[in-house]
Image: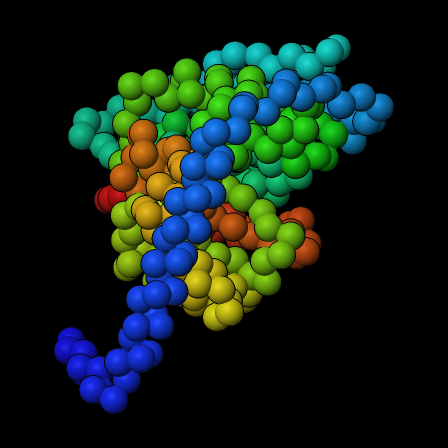
């Protein structure tokens, strides 16, 4: 592909563009310097007075049933979250098809407590792994089906202290982020998949941070459309999804680092995997439809004995 040379009659436009980029660079540098001079945020206070709206024991029973049903699955606790009188485990399940040389993938859900469909889809995947392991025998899988148990129980996006766990991977103020960091220490994956929901999304989207397999993205979006699910396409924003696929550039992770912020996806990309993707469903869609989107996306990305990252 070749690009036409800019016309000689437009040097003022080029100078304006260069000047604008320089000013943007200076502004980012100034904000970074100010941010780095700020102290760490104070310890947040425990939120009280919120009544539980979901039963966490149902999640535990689903995990235990999958563990008991298959020799290929092992479910354990990697730690516990304590907030006042509230206590809950962080569950981890490992799926091993007993075949050598398989790529490794990590599946995460429930970082935001409101993401009910994402958590249910992760639990459904555990059930499918126990019932039909041959469908996913191309992978060694690690699953963390519920990263924010307090938020899930109380239908809140953050944890019991109001911390957005998704953006807590620089300061690690939340117990949930610290437990995940400890679990991931010295682990490496070929692919990480996070199940998410978005109140502003108008359809399904897959968001990549790092390496992407364009053919896998195309197949996944085609399957969504064949199934009759809406696909997001936002042409107004630079980082928005185009035809259901969005990309986070690596320079964006560096900019967040200047401001002492790191998303979960950025942390995973920098520490444990060259390919991190978020499967995002629109929260305004019916619950069962959101679950079905997540399940279809997981089956497309991970299904088949010859699956590759």
Residue 120 picture quarter? top right
What residue is shown at x 35% (from left), y 61% (from top)? 21
Q: Residue furthest left?
A: 2
In the image, is residue 229 above or below residue 142? Answer: below
Q: Is residue 81 left or right of residue 207?
A: right
Q: x, y (%) of residue 6?
A: 22, 82
In the image, is residue 275 above or below residue 145? Answer: below
Q: Quadrant of the N terminus?
A: bottom left
What residue is shown at x 56% (from left), y 61% (from top)? 203
Q: x, y (%) of residue 119?
A: 58, 36
Q: Is residue 103 left or right of residue 105?
A: left
What residue is shown at x 58% (from left), y 47% (from top)? 197
Residue 187 picture quarter? top left
Q: x, y (%) of residue 26?
A: 39, 51
* Image coloring type: rainbow
In the image, is residue 6 above or below residue 127? Answer: below
């Amino acid at each position: 592909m070749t690009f036409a040379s800019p016309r000689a009659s437009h040097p003022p436009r080029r100078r304006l563009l260069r000047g604008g980029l320089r000013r943007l660079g200076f502004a980012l540098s100034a904000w970074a310097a100010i941010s780095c001079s700020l102290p760490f945020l104070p310890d947040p206070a425990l939120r009280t007075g919120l009544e539980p709206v979901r039963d966490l024991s149902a999640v535990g029973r689903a995990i235990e049933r999958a563990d008991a049903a298959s020799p290929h699955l092992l479910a354990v606790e990697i730690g516990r979250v304590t907030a006042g009188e509230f206590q809950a485990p962080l569950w981890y399940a490992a799926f091993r098809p007993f075949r050598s040389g398989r790529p490794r993938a990590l599946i995460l859900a429930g970082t935001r407590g409101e993401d009910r469909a994402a958590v249910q889809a992760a639990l459904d995947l555990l059930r499918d792994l126990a019932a039909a392991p041959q469908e996913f025998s191309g992978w060694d899988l690690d699953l963390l089906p519920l990263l924010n148990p307090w938020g899930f129980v109380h239908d809140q996006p953050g944890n019991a202290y109001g911390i957005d766990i998704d953006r807590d991977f620089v300061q690690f103020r939340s117990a949930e982020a610290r437990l995940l960091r400890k679990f991931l220490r010295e682990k490496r994956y070929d692919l990480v998949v996070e199940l998410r929901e978005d109140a502003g999304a108008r359809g399904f989207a897959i968001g990549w941070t790092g390496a992407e397999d364009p053919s896998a993205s195309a197949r996944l979006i085609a399957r969504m459309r064949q199934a009759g699910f809406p696909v997001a396409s936002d042409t107004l924003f630079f980082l928005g999804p185009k035809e259901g696929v969005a990309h986070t550039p690596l320079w964006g992770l560096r900019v967040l680092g200047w401001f002492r912020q790191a998303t979960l996806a950025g942390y995973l990309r920098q520490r444990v995997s060259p390919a991190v993707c978020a499967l995002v469903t629109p929260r305004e869609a019916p619950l069962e439809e959101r679950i079905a989107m997540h399940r279809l996306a997981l089956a497309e990305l991970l299904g088949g004995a010859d699956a590759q990252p």
